[in-house]
Amino acid sequence: MAHARRKASRNTDANLLLAEIVEALLFLGGQAHRDQVIARVIAVRAAPGGAPAEALKAHILVAFDHQYTLDRSLRGRPPLFDLPFGQGSHRWALAREAETFLRRGREARGPVS
């Protein structure tokens, strides 16, 4: 049971991290160099007692790579992320369909106060 809770906790952390990557990419115009995305996530998370920047950077890289690989392995489901300059590139982007969907959702909710 403890193993299942730890796994669920890790999944929640991974989902939160993916959401933060998405938010950073939206903030940065839909695509940016991965270092800019990482810097944005770290800056937003900056809080006393937060994870050290290097540890968080490693988690961000793993989360993006895992989701990118998962996106490519699931047929019939639009991907969340893209590498516009191809495999091995350090430029991260929201996939076109995902960005369109996310921006429409933001517009529908109106300005954040």
Image (cartoon, helix red, strand yellow):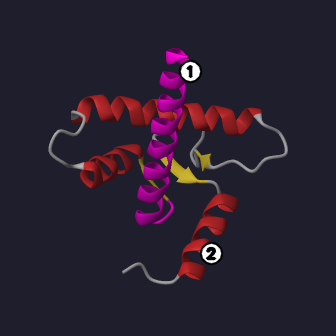
What amino acid is found at the position of numbered circle 1 in the picture? Ala
Q: Is residue 94 magenta?
A: no
Q: Residue at x 83, y 39 (%)?
A: 75
- Would you say 109 lies left or right of 69 here? left
Hey, which residue is sitting farthest right in the picture?
76
What amino acid is found at the position of numbered circle 2 in the picture? Arg
Q: Residue at x 46, y 45 (%)?
A: 16
Please state which of residues 27 and 10 is positioned toward the viewer in this rendering.
Answer: 10
How far apart in space, not on screen, are marks 2 and 1 (Cα)? 36 Å
Tell me, yes or no, if residue 87 can be seen here: no
Count of number-bearing discs? 2
Q: Where residue 1 appears, x then y in whole percent?
A: 55, 17
Q: Where residue 89 appears, x then y in whole percent?
A: 50, 38
Q: Which mark is residue 4?
A: 1
Please state which of residues 87 and 45 is positioned toward the viewer in this rendering.
Answer: 45
Q: Where residue 93 appears, x then y in whole percent?
A: 54, 52
Q: Which residues are magenta?
A: 1-30
Which secondary structure type mostly characterizes the magenta part of the structure? helix
Nearer to us of marks 2 and 1 is 1
Say above or below: 3 vs 78.
above
Say above or below: 107 vs 56.
below
Residue to which mark 2 is pinned:
104
